[in-house]
Structure formats: structure tokens, C-alpha cells
Image: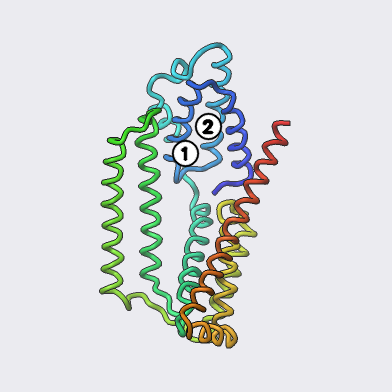
Amino acid sequence: MKTDSVTMLIEENNQLREKLNAANKVYYDKILLYMRSTSLFKTDLEIENILLDLLRDLLEVQKNGESASDFFGKNPQEMCQELLDNTSQVSFKNILKTLVPIVGGGLLATIFFGVLNPVLTINFFQLILEIIVVSVVVWLIFRHMKKTAFKRQNKFKLRDFVPIFINYSLVILVISGIFLLSILFMTDFLVVTVPAPYDIFLIIFLTAILFVWEVITKSDWFKSLLPVFLIMGVLATLARTALGTGLIDYFSESEMRMVVVLLIVYIIAMLAFSVPILLSLSRDKKRRKSNVS
């Protein structure tokens, strides 16, 4: 999780990196990619401080006419790994700060997309599988970035893409197979039914938890997703009321009506997701301009 201080360090790093010459920038970018992709369970503040210190040292060396490879050596991976080995692991508290919105958001999304079901059912087995799959995919992406950080070439070659494509295709095939087997043979495993009116209480509780969690933790990455989950919570709650049930029955009578409703919900969800991100990018851009001036 990135705090305000970590965000400031990243912004400063982005600004100072523009002062590097072309060769030094390519060299340092590989260090930056390796450090960030390998530090998934490391403390962000420590990693960004290390990266900024390395960048400042490199800028001083550059003033004296030396290159990054002269200063750091031809094989910076060993130096990076030694620095990573000396950094502290992320605390369980920070892991929990990230895990709670993922689980809560996933649970709320599961309820929302099952809103047409007359009785609220939650498939915890499927939810656990989804979290595992997302975690595996994220791990694979970071693993690939780590392995290729110091092997990247200026020109992309098609033969470099082939093993990547094969590996990820196999992963997707295995994951799809697991999901298919779970759907066919484990339909009732860890499935919980929540009768009315407790279904409404559960939706309101989950929505409130996610909102309060964001207010307390001030998570940058979850801030952009929060409006989406709030809309999901409101719509899922309304769908469980007498008015919502009547509207669903009305629109279900016509396929065209249902398509229109789904399209409207999709547009609202996309706006709720994209507008906060665009506003955040705009604020960051203004902040960078003010720092430069």
C-alpha cells in the first residue's frame, strides 16, 4: 500500500529521472523495474527511498562524466538483490489493509452480479478460487518482470514473445480447467443462502465496511474503485426491495428492456470507475507542474 510519503518519493523520482542522459536512463530504468517488481512483499517506503538514493548518486556521477555502468558495474542485478535482502518484509497489518477490500469488494461484486436471483446465494468456494487466480496472475506478471528486467532489448523480437505466450496460455488453460471442474462438480460446496431481509442488511454492511475502510486507510489504489463498489451496493440493495423486485420483473418480461437496463448499469459503472482515475491523474499532473515551477 502506498502512503502519501511514498507517492511523493515516486513523484520526485519521476522528475529527477528526466535529468538522466539516454544511456543512464535505460540503465536506471532496469534497476527501477527490477526493484519494484521484486518487492511485492517488501515495505514500499524503504524501496522507494533506496531507488531515490541510487538515482541521486547516479546524477552526481553523471555530472562528473561517468556512466551508470562504470559506477554500479556491468551486472547491477546482484547489487539490487543484496539491497532487497536487507529491506524489511511488509507487515501483516499492511497485508490486511490490502486483503480486506479485495475480499469485501469481491464478495459485494458476487452479490451484485447475482442480483437477478430471487434469493441471495454466495458461493465462497468460487470467491476463494477467484482470489487465488488473481493472486497467481499477479505473481506471474511480477515474476516475468523480474526475470526480464535486465534482459530487455531496445528492439522487440517476435521469438522473445513465443515462450511468454506459451507459458501464459498454459496457465490460462489450467485456470479455466479448474473453474470448469468447480462449476460442474462443486456447485453446492461452500454455498451460503441469505434469506430476506438479512440479504439487505448484509449488502449495506459490506458497503459500509468498504467505505469506512477507505476513510481509515486512505488507500490510493482502492480510492478509484470505491465509487464502483458503492454503486454496486446501492443497486444491489434497491434490487432486494419491493420496488426493485417489481422493476426487475417488469424489465425481465422483455429482452430489449433488459439489454437497455444492463447497458445503463454498465455505463454508470464505467463512469464511476474512470472519472475518479481521470481526476486523480489531473491532480497529479497539476502537482507535478507546481513542483517544477
* 180, above or below 144, in the image: below
Single out the residue that lies furthest toward the front.
256
Q: Amino acid at mark 1?
A: Arg
Quarter of the figure with the C terminus: top right
Q: Which residue does the image show at 30% across and 49% down from the upper left?
A: 168
Quarter-of-image position of residue 242: bottom right
Q: Secondary structure at mark 2?
A: helix
Quarter-of-image position of residue 130: bottom left
Q: Closest to the observer: 263 or 39? A: 263
Q: Closest to the observer: 160 or 290? A: 160
Which mark is drawn over residue 36? 1
Q: Secondary structure at mark 1?
A: helix
* 151, above or below 234, in the image: above
Q: Earlier in the sequence, mark 2 or mark 1?
A: 1
Distance, label 2 to label 1, CA atoms, is 11 Å
Q: How is the image coloured?
A: rainbow
* 255, above or below 157, in the image: below
* Residue 132, image x, y percentages: 37, 59
Residue 257 horizontal side relative to residue 293, left or right: left
Q: Which residue is mark 2?
A: 50
* 150, above or below 194, in the image: above
* Disc nearest the viewer among 2 and 1: 1
Residue 223 horizontal side relative to residue 199, left or right: right
Q: Which residue does the image show at 55% across and 16% down from the upper left?
A: 62
Residue 72 horizontal side relative to residue 274, left or right: left
* Residue 192, image x, y percentages: 41, 79
* Residue 43, image x, y percentages: 51, 43
